[in-house]
Amino acid sequence: MAAGPDRIAVPFDGAGEGVGELAWGQQEAWMSIRRLGSWMPLGGVKPLPPGTTVEDVAAELRYLMSRFHVLRSRVRLDAEQHPTQEVFAHGEIDLDLVDADGEDPAEAAARVRRRYAETALDLAAEWPIRMGVVLDRGRPTHMIALISHFAVDAHGAQVMLDDVAARTTTPVAGTSPLEQAAWQQSAAGRRQNDAALRYHESVLRSIAPSRFPAQPAQTEPKIWTGEFTSRALPRAVARITARTGFDAATSLLTLFAVAQARITGVHPVVLRPMVGNRFRRGLADVVCTVTQAGLCALDVADAPFEEVLARVKRTTMTAYKHAYHNPFDLEELVTRVSRERGVDINIACFFNNRRGESPTAVATGATTATAATVPAVAEMREVLPDSVFRGTVTGQKPMRRTFARVEPDVADAMRLSILLDTGLLSPADGQAWLQEIETVAVEAASKV
């Protein structure tokens, strides 16, 4: 068993400091962190090349802290629990040193990663990053680094990793969260927020209050996750995008929506797609979290699949445009409209495409496939028996939400996952939803 960590203090100094409001992306992440009771860590374990020293790892941590404002930020709460942020110009952070003590170093690193992820992090008192190094007889073998989603989203994390690999010294790209927050409170920012709220209110007043049919009773477990891996699905999506000219992101969102409508019987389908917002000025490569959830009511009934694709594209383009807003204001809007309609409107049905399509391509509709290599229908159907579903249990608390994801591809397969509150949808229906996505895709790809 690996021994508990020793620590060394790593001092850092960086340009920029100040106090101000949270930017909208930070606000959305903060609300999720509070709701889920998790600091939402991103990251993992990295094997270290032979010859790496503790000083090398400390230098990497010092580089990260010195370069990126978001890692030098802490949340400040007032008497009403309203969050603001303070960015520090200098300070120090601990680097954990964990002796494998006879345990396999990779297993020791995995244990440290689990401990980091499962131990609460106080964003008001701690930096939003935890880093450690595993030592095997004094030699560093693995580095563990986890960063809160409050600080970065997936794209921001990748930009950070690229800068670390190159040890970039040019000024950081993009508009910092403090600068974003200042613009958001300006007249132009208020106009953007007001327009987004008007759009959201129009959707909230037109939709059914629930995304799913009433459940007879909540089943056990109360929170359930499932994962479906399909070799047929990426081939079907490639065929659809090449034949129709619609991008992969629109195709996948359409497949999810059509499958949801078939399983639930609820029309229109209301989804909250996660929008990177990287197409906005100053946000393309900024290291922070700017991802927010959009809102769209999708009419996917009674039309050929290509027409449904066109409907989804039109609707989601409008949703993406308005997925940049103050989420505290949106929460108040949902409460107000629910009260005025006399129903509890639940819009917590999220969709996240994590395959890595360019944020600009997703927002602008640029296609991501061509007709150069179109998989044959026979090839697509031949791999259907390889599909695998796996259900798991999670320790998260009930939260009245459903979160469906397209995960990064594995080899030549596509992975879909779902996390759901079984008070909204049963595990059987959750499994059927993921499997129906493959069915819809193969049907559509066979016709185009």
Image: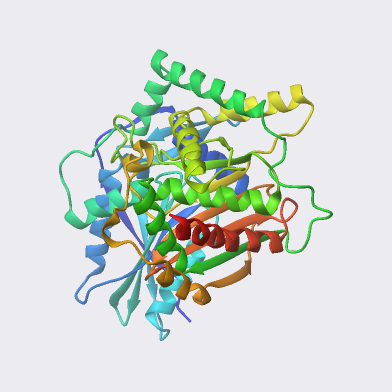
* Residue occupying image coordinates x 52% and y 76%: 385
* Residue occupying image coordinates x 51% and y 48%: 305
* Residue occupying image coordinates x 56% and y 20%: 198
Residue 67 appears at what percent x and percent y?
Answer: 25, 44
Please identify the quadrant where the C terminus is shown. bottom left
Residue 202 appears at what percent x and percent y?
Answer: 60, 23
Residue 280 appears at what percent x and percent y?
Answer: 33, 31
- Relative placement, left or right, of 173 versus 255 is left
Residue 363 image-quadrant placement: top left
- Relative placement, left or right, of 46 versus 401 is left
Which residue is situated farthest in the bottom direction here? Answer: 102
Which residue is situated farthest in the front direction here? Answer: 447
Vertical relation: 204 (above or below) 140? above
In front: 64, or 44?
Answer: 44
Colouring chosen for the image of the structure: rainbow
Which residue is situated farthest in the right direction here? Answer: 216
| Res. 282 in view | yes
Residue 425 appears at what percent x and percent y?
Answer: 71, 54
Residue 345 image-quadrant placement: top right
Residue 269 image-quadrant placement: top right
* Residue occupying image coordinates x 73% and y 50%: 424
Vertical relation: 272 (above or below) 99? above
Vertical relation: 176 (above or below) 126? above
| Res. 395 in view | no
In front: 267, or 122?
Answer: 267
- Relative placement, left or right, of 403 versus 407 is right
